[in-house]
Amino acid sequence: MCKKRILVADDEPDIVRGLMLRLTSAGYSVSTAMDGLEATKKAIEDQPDLILLDIGMPAGTGHVVVERLRNIEATCQIPVIYLTARTGVEDYRKARDGGVAKYITKPFDPEVLLAAVEQELEKAGLCR
């Protein structure tokens, strides 16, 4: 397992806390954001290796965050995994069109999420 930086962006404090504990115990360095604006700012400043992103957040949905990041050279290649309660066809389409790597719905199995994180980091050439 490789130790990389992950940005967790979700407006639910319990989800953020749980993900932070799970990911840090798995050896990842984790930063957090509670809304879309903060997520965009932290992604640009910190350039994490991967972003776990909720869709339904204040101050910019996950879709808005992805669109912004895809238009910035320094962040356009960061893998994004959506972690969301939304299951609508339009959200899936926007995720696909925006280049979102994976779409995981809440509630989620933490082991499945960790496997997805590792897989996307490997795909990006960040783990061996």
Image (spheres, rainbow, N blue to C red):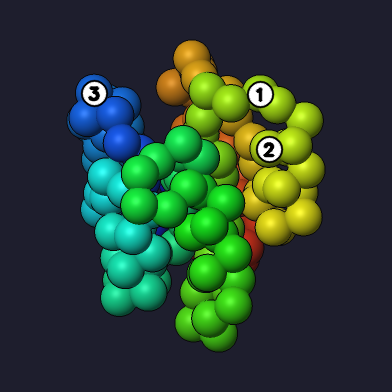
Q: Provide residue 109's location: percent of width, then percent of height.
A: 50, 17
What is the distance, in whole Å, between disc 3 and disc 2 at their CAs?
23 Å
Quarter-of-image position of residue 104: top right
- Residue kind at label 3, given as amino acid type: Asp
Q: Provide residue 46's location: percent of width, then percent of height.
A: 30, 71
Q: Nearer the viewer, residue 25 or 71?
A: 71
Q: Provide residue 18's location: percent of width, then percent of height.
A: 27, 26
Residue matched to label 2? 91
Q: Residue at x 66, y 23 (%)?
A: 87
- Residue kind at label 1, given as amino acid type: Thr
- Extreme residue toward the front, this view: 59
Determine the secondary structure under disc 3: helix
What is the distance, in whole Å, between disc 2 and disc 1 at their CAs?
7 Å
Q: Nearer the viewer, residue 122 or 79?
A: 79
Q: Is residue 13 visible?
A: yes
Sequence order check, earlier mark of 3 and 2: 3
Q: For this view, does 117 lie left or right of residue 41?
A: right
Q: Nearer the viewer, residue 61 or 16?
A: 61
How busy is the neighbourhood of tag 1: few (under 14 within 10 Å), some, or many (20 plus)? few
Q: Is residue 121 visible?
A: no
**Are discs 2 and 1 less than 8 Å apart at CB?**
yes
Q: Quadrant of the C terminus?
A: bottom right
Residue matched to label 1? 87
Residue matched to label 3? 14
How busy is the neighbourhood of tag 2: few (under 14 within 10 Å), some, or many (20 plus)? some
Determine the secondary structure under disc 2: helix
Q: For this view, does 1 lie left or right of residue 66?
A: left
Quarter-of-image position of residue 73: bottom right
- Residue kind at label 2, given as amino acid type: Asp
